[in-house]
Image (tube, coloured by chain):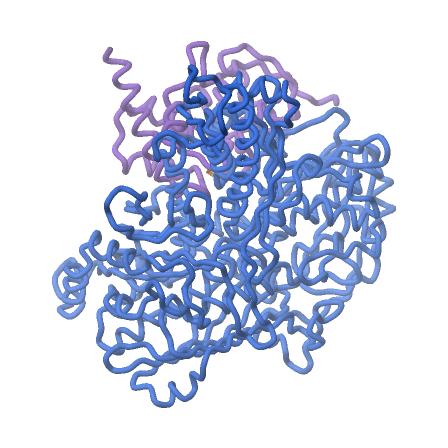
Chain colours: A blue, B purple
Amino acid sequence: MATPIGASPTYVGNPSLQNVDGADKITGRARYVGDMTVPGMLVGKVLRSAVPHARIVELDVTPALAVAGVRAAITHRDFVDNGPFGWPVRDAFVLAYRKVRYVGDPIAAVAADTAEAAQAGIEAIRVTYELLPVISDMAAALDPGAPQIPEVSPTGKGNLCATHLLRNGDPDSLLAGGQVILEATYSLPHQEHAYLETEGALAIPEPGGGVTVYANCQSPHIARDTAALVLGLEPSLVRVIQPFVGGAFGGKDDIVYQTTAQVAKLALLAGRPVRLVLSRPESMAASYKRESMKSRITLAADSDGTLRAAKVAITVDSGAYASMSPMTAWRATMHAAGAYRYQAVHVDTQVLYTNNGYSGAFRGFGNTPASAAAELAIDELAERLGRDPLEFRLQNCLRSGDCTMTGVRTPGGAGLAACLEWVRDRSDWATKRAAYDEQRAVGAGVDSRRSRRGIGVACYFHGSGLGGEGVDFATARLAVDADYGITLTAGLTDFGQGSRTVFSLLAAETLGVRMDRIRVLRPDTQTALDSGPTVASRASIVGGNAVRVTAQKIGHVLTLAAADLLGCAPERILRSGEAYIGPAEDPISFEAVVDHARTMGLQLSADGRWQVRPIEWDFERGTGEPYFAYVFGAQVAEVEVSAVTGRTRVLKIWAAHDAGTILYPKGALGQMYGGIAQGLGYALMEDFRFEAGMPQALDFDRYRIPRAMDIPDIEGTYIQMLPVGTGQPPVGTGQPGGPYGAKNLAEPVMIATAPAIANAFAQATGRRVRSMPLPLWNG
Amino acid sequence: MANKILVAATINGEPTEFLCEPQQSLLEGLRDVLGLTGAKEGCNDGNCGACSVLLDGRLVNSCLVLAAEIQGREVTSIEGLATWQGLHPLQQAFIDEDALQCGFCTPGMIIAAKALLDRDPDPTEERIRAWLSGNLCRCTGYDKIVRAVQAAAAAMRSEVTV
Ligand code: FES
Ligand code: FES
């Protein structure tokens, strides 16, 4: 490799970097699936269940086909083996087979000339149900008489979907001898992703029997494989392309695979393109949610405040289908006692089927509710010990070299203490904490009758990548084009989190070229190699590394060509900007080197793959190494609770995240603020409730998400590993193997927000709440 | 269809005529009839602001306005903001401040912010937050959006004084 002149990178961490898609997005030019039209396009529409649990007695779509303008109508019968899909459990159907299991379950679909005709078609479909008992409470899911919700129980035990365990040492003996014990149960609600763009897909039948689908899913390869299987087509005949995606946060997997297969079938039958975009109420009913969770936590500490042991029992409401819940529950299990040093920890987790919608991936992936519960418990324990909650955390938090709750040494170090100290100092913690304690003690004065203030803290750790959830790899492809631009095809995708910008800057940085030479193609199963799912904040780390190794391959070829042109050994070449410099001659341009490489017959395209070091988790015994690395962070929230309205208002949030090298600083801050806003919603207003299986809010009027006015001032920082050579010691920690030392950040930043707010509420009101969202305070 | 309505209006400065159904919303008219897909449908019930446009300079949710209602009136959507001289200062500021992620709320946000700055060239942060509270964004946490509006306001004020 040629040696770059000057050690400081040009693009990595450059604060002026902007989103590569910015110009398309601010002009309205960016096309999302609902913006796309093609001639002859039909409108697709789905008939969905209005009841939470029923046997389908009769289902007949022929009356729909008689409606003027209806061109195709489908049910489960139109798919191979009735269209089952899903991973890790194949318990879902493209369209309901034999039963409906939640309100919103798709039953049949039509394609018609107009939206009105499609609606008339849906209304003409004949369907009769035999209602079945509804399970809406997890506690009843395993009752002896409970109706079994899935067609086949994955555990052989009725509505028990999955179990996990973690075994580290023997907590029971420590609990018995522990001096201070806390035992409490915490409940976390379902949360709706509420991406601003609903799910949708546009299918175009192709000559030769294939079909191309533009779908706003997160992982086009999985959408393709799912559709090919249920359509009975070779995967090569199904092409899935991801257009611009209006937000996902983990929520555009299964539901969009299902939609993709539905429109593909309709288009193939009608012989015309079909577009189907869900309405907001339809999306809210049909799409999967963050799981609701109950976490029963027992903690033991010595009277000097040293944490000793934890036992946690978790139940996860998976709803009607497994989707990713077995995996989110595994992640919850690995994080259930929080980012602290323990001598022993046991966790036992059950995932249960109910008729409450269904649950799957959502930012934080099981760790968001698990850590919220743990952080409420830690705060209560600190109070019982008479300790300041922040100092108590500092005393017990994971530091480099410590073992996590699973009993393995933190790989790559832990920057958690630095994060806690940063939020403590910036928030003026000690002064405010004391003042607000006093306000409560006195309880007098006009202000304290009208409103009370409190300040609270929470922290987190978050295992990087998929961990034991699957093989963690990604691919990339780069090619130098005839006009000296460079086309980049990445297997992992961008649905708003800025990966396209990160990939561009990594390719430009590694190749030593201008960033505007890089063009990132839209993800397309025809051009991109499979990279597995874009989940678990993998894009920057795993996808970024794949881009880096691919760029290194092309960079190597270009260096050889430059050496040949300059008549020197490759090691002698230096770079200045884009130019290549040899020992003797004038610098030569990137273009000249590319031209010369072509005359030498060298290939200027390459594929690359990067895989995370494999880790070992023994699911049977609950032991092993769950993740190759962790990220850490801490947040402080200051709140004011009104005695008049009972409402909690967040005044300010301080957030520090140990993120290694920040690749794209503006994007990283956006991720942080966005995550905090979602965490604030989780704490204060977002509660996707089911009553007897009926969803209680299907619009933004009743399901409120934070608006600009709800968001306080946020002071955030990334504790970064300082570049080598600055003479200063590193504060945070880099990730072993992350591109340029980067760690992931998209998901974990939201984890601390809700518990920090709840802990602040507890100080303000003197009331410990063990469920979210927080209630109105009634004095 | 027999009962279509012929609407004549000024859309993004251009005199425009189009046919619409009596029931059709302005959002559907813009998107489905005129092919102006910059305004988005996020909820279709007035709660998200993704469909924001200016109607005679006033901020409206185009999903709540009938297409037929714009007869003889002026509509500005995101497509009408940039001119031959370049981007509107708000558009530039949204790029510079990186005030977008998925971008789905962005057209509506920019339009809503324009309506504010047209009225109040120097709004406080609180006013900006209150004004933009009709526009949902699930990605950004609003911080960079507020910064962008402040930056654009400053840029527009200095333009005026120069
Ligand atoms: S689409 Fe009009 S306000 Fe949401
Ligand atoms: S940028 Fe995604 S909703 Fe605002």
Asked if one can make out residue B52 in the rendered structure from this viewpoint, the answer is no
Q: Is residue A29 left or right of residue A78?
A: left
Where, by quadrant of the figure, is residue A113 drawn?
top right
Q: Which residue is depicted at the point 51% across and 24% down?
A: A563
At which x and y percent is residue A304? Answer: 23, 79
At which x and y percent is residue A181? Answer: 34, 83
Q: Which residue is depicted at the point 84% across and 57% down?
A: A81
Task: Please count the marks in the image.
Answer: 0
At which x and y percent is residue B3? Answer: 70, 23
Quadrant containing the C terminus of chain A in the rendered view: bottom left
Asked if one can make out residue B8 in the rendered structure from this viewpoint, the answer is yes
Q: Which of A726 and A659 is in front in this view?
A: A726
Q: In this view, does A517 lie to the left or right of A119?
A: left
Q: Is residue A123 left or right of residue B18?
A: right
Q: Which residue is depicted at the point 80% across and 55% down?
A: A127
Judge whether A695 appears above or below B61 on screen. Answer: below
Judge whether A206 appears above or below B158 on screen. Answer: below
Where, by quadrant of the figure, is residue A311 drawn?
bottom left
Judge whether A8 appears above or below B30 on screen. Answer: below
At which x and y percent is residue A615? Answer: 55, 62
Q: Which residue is depicted at the point 31% across and 49% down?
A: A719
Where, by quadrant of the figure, is residue A160 drawn?
bottom right
Judge whether A753 appears above or below A345 on screen. Answer: above
Q: In this view, does A370 lie to the left or right of A722?
A: right
Q: Which of A464 and A727 is in front in this view?
A: A727
